[in-house]
Image: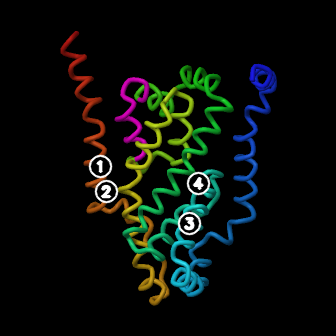
């Protein structure tokens, strides 16, 4: 056991192999899969997908979650299309649960790969950085639960970035998984519900409105959740000022 540990420490490339593989597959996937995980591909194969689902429901669920996990874990193109597909095949419920499960498993894979490969070194670099990344880091350090939910709820924070930053900041795995699972539920429900209505979209020869999350009746409730998540941070800031 000691020899293996020492060998790993002496071979930084070996430690970073998982995240290197993820990077290589992500680049290759962006090139080779860009024409497969698209709205047009879903529209062209919708009847075959429905037929397969009706004949093999449980298998379809397992395969779908596995594909979603791989797409997120390797940052492949098509996560948004898969979310729509989850709604199209399984309706809003339980479709959004399958979407959230796949996204959470994939995010956890990136989190573990990044922590094992870079961890403390990048954590030190982030400490000396500036801008949004530094603000997120400082916020997570002081208010882990609140900040973890915030970076999931706020549409402006890229999903890949929200997976990487906690891996460098000593965030416990359990806390990361819980905040990811529940934090992405609101957005997942919105896009899964769009997918559930794709039958009418296909019939009309149109494309879905993926910007729906920024419409007031959708955005304001999500911003309300963001405010609730940020409340402990605001209260701590107010108490800190009173203590001065």
Q: Quadrant of the C terminus?
A: top left
Task: Write down the residue under mark 1.
Answer: 223
Find residue 62 and name its label: 3
Badge 4 element: helix
Q: CA distance from mark 3 to mark 1?
A: 33 Å
**Among the 4 quarters of the image, the one containing residue 11:** top right
Q: Which is nearer the N-term, disc 4 or disc 3? A: 3
Q: From the top left corner, tell me how far across and down residue 95 is, in percent.
A: 43, 68
Q: Residue at x 55, y 84 (%)?
A: 55
Q: CA distance from mark 4 to mark 2?
A: 24 Å
Badge 1 element: helix
Residue 151 lies in magenta, yes or no?
yes
In this picture, which residue range is highlighted in magenta?
A: 140-152
Q: Which is nearer the N-term, disc 2 or disc 3? A: 3
What is the magenta segment's predominant secondary structure?
A: helix
Q: Which is nearer the N-term, disc 1 or disc 4? A: 4
Find residue 172 and name its label: none
Task: Write down the residue under mark 2.
Answer: 219
Residue 112 lies in magenta, yes or no?
no
Tags 1 and 4 touching, CB below 8 Å: no
Question: Depth-wise, is mark 3 or mark 1 nearer the camera?
Answer: 3
Q: Which is nearer the N-term, disc 3 or disc 1? A: 3
Q: Residue at x 29, y 29 (%)?
A: 233
Task: Write down the residue under mark 4.
Answer: 72
Question: Depth-wise, is mark 1 or mark 4 nearer the camera?
Answer: 4
Residue 219 as seen in the image, left or right of residue 200 = left
Q: From the top left corner, tell me how far across and down residue 41 is, in percent.
A: 62, 78
Query: Which residue is at the far left?
Result: 242
Tags 2 and 1 touching, CB below 8 Å: yes
Badge 2 element: helix
């Amino acid at each position: 056991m000691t020899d293996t540990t020492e060998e790993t420490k002496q071979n930084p490339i070996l430690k970073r192999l998982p995240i290197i593989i993820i990077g290589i597959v992500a680049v290759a996937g962006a090139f080779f899969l860009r024409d497969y995980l698209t709205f047009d591909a879903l529209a062209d194969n919708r009847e075959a997908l429905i037929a397969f689902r009706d004949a093999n429901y449980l298998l379809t669920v397992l395969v779908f979650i596995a594909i979603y996990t791989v797409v997120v874990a390797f940052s492949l193109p098509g996560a948004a299309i898969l979310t729509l597909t989850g709604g199209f095949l399984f309706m809003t419920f339980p479709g959004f649960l399958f979407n959230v499960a796949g996204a959470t498993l994939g995010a956890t894979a990136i989190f573990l790969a990044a922590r094992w490969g870079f961890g403390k070194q990048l954590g030190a670099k982030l400490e000396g950085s500036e801008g949004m990344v530094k603000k997120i880091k400082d916020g997570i350090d002081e208010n882990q639960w609140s900040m973890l939910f915030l970076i999931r709820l706020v549409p402006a924070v890229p999903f890949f970035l929200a997976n990487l930053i906690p891996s460098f900041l000593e965030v416990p795995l359990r806390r990361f998984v819980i905040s990811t699972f529940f934090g992405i539920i609101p957005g997942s429900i919105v896009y899964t519900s769009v997918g559930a209505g794709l039958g009418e979209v296909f019939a009309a020869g149109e494309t879905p409105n993926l910007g729906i999350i920024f419409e007031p009746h959708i955005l304001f409730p999500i911003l309300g959740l963001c405010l609730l998540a940020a409340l402990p941070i605001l209260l701590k800031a107010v108490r800190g000022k009173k203590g001065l």
